[in-house]
Image: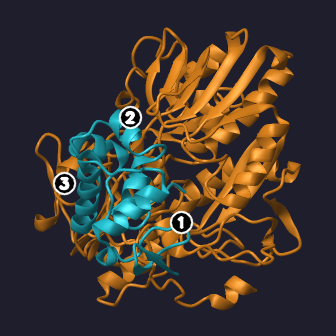
Chain colours: A cyan, B orange
Amino acid sequence: MTATIAGVAVEVDGDGFLQKPEQWNREIGAEIAREAGIAEMTDKHWQVVEFMRNQYLETGSAPSIRSLGKESGVPIKELYQLFPKGPAKLAAKIGGIPKPRGCI
Amino acid sequence: MKRILILGAGTAGTIMANRLRKLYKREMKAGSMEITIVDQDDRHVYQPGLLFVPFGIYSPEDCVRPRRPQVKGGVRYVTGAIDRVEADEDRVYLEGGKTLDYDLLVVATGTEIAPQETEGLTGAGWNEKMFDFYTLEGATRLAEALEKWEGGRLVVNIVEMPIKCPIAPLEFVFLADWYFTKKGMRDKVELALATPLDGAFTRPIASKAFGDLLDRKGVELVPDFNAGEVDGPEGKLKSWDEREVDFDLLVSIPLHMGAEYVSRSPGLGDDMNFVFTDPNTLQAKRKENIFALGDATNVPTSKAGSVAHFEAEVLEQNIRRYMAGEPLAEEFDGHANCFIETGHNKAVLIDFNYDVEPLPGKFPIAGVGPLSLLKETRFNHWGKLAFKWVYWNMLLPGMDMPAVPARMSMRGKKHGDLPKLQRHDVLGGSPTNNDNGDEANKVA
């Protein structure tokens, strides 16, 4: 389905994850963050989101919370403070990449 | 001569070896095909049985047979630990320097628990008040502990998804409820399930059904709980967002990872050591002559024996196609089929795939059954117990299941006006066309 975020028409899934990462920009990310209750995206937030996004674009799959904690430069506990409840999921959503491979 | 090499002689590898052995019977006799299977030991554990060990229903010995006899005639069995796969050389290195060359490689090395990845879990109290039941050793020690336990708060915790047999934690609490009831001490036991999921199960309808069952059995559900740390002596399970769950006895389903050699095999797997695998053809992304099935893959369906069985049916044909120079078929649909033991001699059966979540109905014959989907019945329980015989005598030898095809059937399922799940919801990738035929089957 199509949604308009930060004035741009983008393809999203039922949970609001962008389906085409190339449609993303920082304004879109900031608006998704605001809707998810993150009023202000700090440098730390962007560091995580961009790490996540780059990993996805390079490898085709989003990193797990564990490798996010090891490799993004932000420890897992802090990730949960930055992105309450589900850091991997929320950072993926803000970063404009599809919902991380869930658990079935 | 062509050489097929299978890594891992567990459920998936054994089924695959036996199917390929039958497929290439003539070629093997003529000496133009060699099939080799590698495993590091000769102990095949019947993993569905592990659930029953803590409650004294099965003994540890009931669950183990040697690996070798399950792989039938003609297949070469090599014992050795795998060091790495060098895909560019079409060669597998074993520890100690031995190498195995192949024309086609099948990765079936499954997944293992990694309790050491959770801070404190393997520290003080591990195997005393904190246990796993995903290994025979863990399940056996837990049986001893439960037998003499005098009651208190028992917490089952899933550390992180994906896990093997994702319904096993639910079955564990259902059986625990039954076990303590039978012992006349249910009133001395508090049961809780702490899970990273937002409900009892991953898909909405089954999640609701199992959530209701938990309620009825007086089991507390703690959803959205991502365990980051365990304090054994204090009996506290702590989440990353700093919530705490108290326990007297912790049954942990630790983080799962693919086999360690995957991390030493350039480009083969992801950061959890699961092999990058095409979800429909089961070809590894690393190189065209590598395939993978069972728990070892990163395909977004359950890690379960039934899945390995359905995958093997599809993969056998894709291996035949690959060897014959034909294009692969995108046939695998994520089909999974699981019995869920709910205690009191009853069980629930679920049947689902990448697109369709578990639904109520009858199985495998529409309207008749004899098994019931998403509903507690005694017949389902008998089905689950009979499965042990089916496993050793039909599943591992690589036979097809009567009336249960590899692709999921919508026959007998009550789907009403349910929207079909969007494939990318579970795949997390861009939507792809998965409707390669069999549409009639889906709406029948």
In 3D space, how far apart are the residues under numbered discs 3 and 2 (Cα atoms)? 19 Å
Residue at image mark 2: B114
- Foreground residue among A8 and B119: A8
Residue at image mark 3: B265
Crowding at mark 1 (Cα within 10 Å: few <14, some 14-19, many 20+)? few
Q: Is residue A92 above or below residue B211?
A: below
Q: In the picture, which quadrant includes the C terminus of chain B?
A: bottom right
Q: Is residue B15 left or right of residue B349?
A: left
Q: Is residue B12 above or below residue B179?
A: below
Task: For marks 3 and 1, give the one nearer the viewer.
Answer: 1
Crowding at mark 2 (Cα within 10 Å: few <14, some 14-19, many 20+)? some
The amino acid pointed to by label 1 is Asp
What residue do we see at 59% from left, 51% from top?
B392
- Foreground residue among B253 and B14: B253
Residue at image mark 1: A15
Q: Is residue B364 visible?
A: yes
Q: Is residue B269 visible?
A: no
The amino acid pointed to by label 2 is Ala
Q: Position of residue B217 (x, y in %)?
A: 82, 34
